[in-house]
């Protein structure tokens, strides 16, 4: 339990909401999180991208004081996660991957429960509940049991719960995992509203590239517990530069393509080759000259997904079918 | 520590457990119907071949069934922690500014409420079946049961806090519940047992609950009431301490 210290360690005059310093979590010899350093500024939507098992959720759990780091530390809203865990938890909110609302309680009761946990009571709690219900459009369903809600409504209820106590930092762990495109769009616009109108700092983990591209001011790509790239989505794409050119031909001689400096990456499989090319409009002709009997050519601009592949060297890993995933799938099906 | 904050936290967690208990009809039904079924079938079945001096078998095993109901419902209550863990409900509670100790005590309150409701139903059944109960004996019985429930609910929560899967919880808790029940003297007198069994019955807290209830309801017992009560209170204090420790160490 936190001791009552006369002065809270709040940093004066700085606009950093989260400061992560050499944060490390080891499980035996495996480093789930390996000396991560990050700063997240007030009002930002900050994305943490990474394949499954990259250390995203572990980092979040440490920031939320639910998991003790092996070494290193972090400050959230100026409070140290090791020294002032209660103050950290008071000032943040976390929306988890799985519903943290109880199915057998109504939407209203779930919110009331969480309000009480955050020391809200009386008229104040009722006003807050009304406000967050309006924000996520659940006012007319507030007296229905949560198990009657669809997957999207359930997620909105989670977000409403997360906002109930006016947090300064909101952690969203895979906020649109397993939702249909329309619902995702809805959730995204709620998240944008929060950031714009309430100036909440939002840290979001995701492995959906479009989600990161759409929402995030800045992105950190994490793999094997390390930050391997950090910038705005635009800059990340620009830094890699160019377009993706996909060629299909009967015979492709890769060594001929290797001499071109404007080709940054070559991936060959069977009779297709995928190239990352700079200045495509000028250079495409040169490439085509080197390859006989081209069946098809496809050119598209780089996306964040390509950036991700470039840094992590692979597509987003498929989720392993653990028992928990099966149960998640089951609860989603049964609650939709 | 802010007492208002703690009180609200306790109320929030208790409120949820209570609501869920009321709404999960199968839970209410099974927890009440099962002991009644056992009491009627077992009591009259074995009662027909057993004769005890001074009392009928049904009255003799009534304290045992009270204890059985408590054991089953209280310890299995810990399974809900495992489910809360599997979904993210538990994380949602743990990420709130409430302390782990408050969360443990709130949970325990919830489990105690559930068990008290079940015990009360069984008391009514006992009265209906003609078990000799008086206001005083019911009152003291509740005192014994309350501490025994606090102990067993805490024990269930300790197991639940350490387990990752509901199956694992089921296995481990069965290894706790059944020996506690069978070695409590709920079904047969504990006199004339071989020495090694005597030792096991003496370290079993359920023994003292059964004995204490029997001494009040039937007027016959192995130990003095004060010994029974002290043993049960000691058990509950031990379990609360262990539970607080387990919740503070619990990983999500």
Image (cartoon, coloured by chain):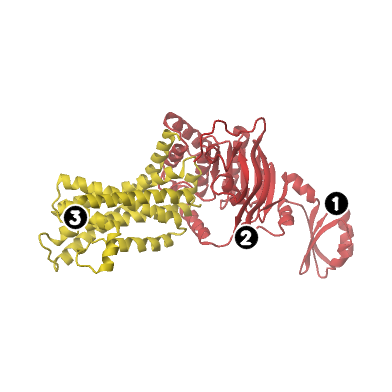
The residue that mark 1 highlights is A279
At mark 3, the secondary structure is helix
Q: Is A106 placed left or right of B41 in the picture?
A: right
Q: Mark 1, residues whose alpha carbon is within 10 Å: few (<14), some, or many (≥20)?
A: few
Mark sitting on residue A94: none
- Label 3 is found on which chain of the structure? B
**Count of residue discs:** 3
Instruction: Nearest to the eye among marks 3 and 1: give it.
Output: 3
Q: Is A216 placed left or right of B239 in the picture?
A: right
Percent x, y of residue B156: 37, 54
Instruction: Nearest to the eye among marks 1 and 2: give it.
Output: 2
Q: Tell me the shade of chain B.
A: yellow
The span from disc 2 to disc 3 (Cα, nearest Å) is: 56 Å
- Label 1 is found on which chain of the structure? A
Tags 1 and 2 on a common chain: yes
Q: Is residue B56 above or below residue B5?
A: below
The span from disc 1 to disc 2 (Cα, nearest Å) is: 45 Å
Q: Mark 3, residues whose alpha carbon is within 10 Å: few (<14), some, or many (≥20)?
A: many
Percent x, y of residue B159: 41, 56
Q: Nearer the viewer, residue B133 or A263?
A: B133
Q: Quadrant of residue B187?
A: bottom left
Q: Nearer the viewer, residue A209 or B49?
A: B49
The residue that mark 3 highlights is B214
Whichever of labels 1 and 2 marks the residue nearer the N terminus, that label is 2
Q: Which chain is red?
A: A
Q: Which residue appears farthest toward the left when viewing the image?
A: B54
Q: Mark 2, residues whose alpha carbon is within 10 Å: few (<14), some, or many (≥20)?
A: few
Mark sitting on residue A29: 2
At mark 1, the secondary structure is loop
Percent x, y of residue B95: 51, 44
């Amino acid at each position: 339990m936190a001791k009552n210290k006369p002065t809270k360690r709040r940093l004066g005059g700085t606009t950093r909401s989260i400061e992560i310093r050499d944060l490390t979590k080891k499980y035996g010899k495996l480093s789930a999180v390996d000396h991560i350093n990050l700063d997240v500024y007030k009002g930002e939507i900050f994305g943490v991208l990474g394949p499954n098992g990259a250390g995203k959720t572990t980092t979040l759990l440490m920031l939320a004081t639910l998991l003790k780091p092996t070494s290193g530390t972090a400050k959230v809203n100026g409070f140290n996660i090791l020294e002032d865990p209660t103050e950290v938890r008071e000032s943040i909110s976390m929306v988890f991957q799985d519903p943290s609302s109880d199915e057998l309680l109504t939407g209203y009761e779930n919110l009331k429960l969480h309000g009480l946990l955050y020391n809200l009571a009386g008229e104040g709690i009722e006003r807050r509940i009304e406000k967050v219900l309006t924000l996520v459009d659940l006012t007319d369903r507030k007296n229905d049991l949560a198990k009657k809600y669809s997957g999207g409504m359930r997620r909105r209820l989670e977000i409403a719960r997360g906002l109930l106590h006016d947090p300064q930092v909101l952690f969203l762990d895979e906020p649109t995992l397993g939702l249909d495109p329309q619902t995702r769009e809805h959730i995204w616009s709620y998240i944008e509203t929060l950031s714009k109108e309430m100036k909440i700092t939002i840290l979001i983990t995701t492995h959906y590239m479009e989600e990161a591209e759409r929402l995030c001011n800045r992105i950190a790509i994490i793999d094997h517990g390390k930050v391997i790239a950090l910038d705005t989505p635009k800059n990340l794409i620009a830094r890699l530069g160019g377009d993706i050119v996909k060629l299909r031909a009967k015979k492709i001689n890769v060594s001929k393509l290797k001499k071109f400096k404007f080709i940054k990456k070559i991936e060959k499989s069977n009779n297709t080759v995928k190239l990352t090319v700079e200045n495509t409009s000028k250079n495409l002709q040169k490439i085509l000259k080197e390859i006989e009997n081209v069946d098809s050519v496809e050119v598209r601009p780089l996306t964040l997904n390509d950036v991700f592949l470039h840094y992590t060297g692979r597509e987003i890993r498929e989720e392993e079918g653990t028992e928990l995933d099966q149960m998640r799938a089951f609860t989603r099906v049964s609650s939709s | 520590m802010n007492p208002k904050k703690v009180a609200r936290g306790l109320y929030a967690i208790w409120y949820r457990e209570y609501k869920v208990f009321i709404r999960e009809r199968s839970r209410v039904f099974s927890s009440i119907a099962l002991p009644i079924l056992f009491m009627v079938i077992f009591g009259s079945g074995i009662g027909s071949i057993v004769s005890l001096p001074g009392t009928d078998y049904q009255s003799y095993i009534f304290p045992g069934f009270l204890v059985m109901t408590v054991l089953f419902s209280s310890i299995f209550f810990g399974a809900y922690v495992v489910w809360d863990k599997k979904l993210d409900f538990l994380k949602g509670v743990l990420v709130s500014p409430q302390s782990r100790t408050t969360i443990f005590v709130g949970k325990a309150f919830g489990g105690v409420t559930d068990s008290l409701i079940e015990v009360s139903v069984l008391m009514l059944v006992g009265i209906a079946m003609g078990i000799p109960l008086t206001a005083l004996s019911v009152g003291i019985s509740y005192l014994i049961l309350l501490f025994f429930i606090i102990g067993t609910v805490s024990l269930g929560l300790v197991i639940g806090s350490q387990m990752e899967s509901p199956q694992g919880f089921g296995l481990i808790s069965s290894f706790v519940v059944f020996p506690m029940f069978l070695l409590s003297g709920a079904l047969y007198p504990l006199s004339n047992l071989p020495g090694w069994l005597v030792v096991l019955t003496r370290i079993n807290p359920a023994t003292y609950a059964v004995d204490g209830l029997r001494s009040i309801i039937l007027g016959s017992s192995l130990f003095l009431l004060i010994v029974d009560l002290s043993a049960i209170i000691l058990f509950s204090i031990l379990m609360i301490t262990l539970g607080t420790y387990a919740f503070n160490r619990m990983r999500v």
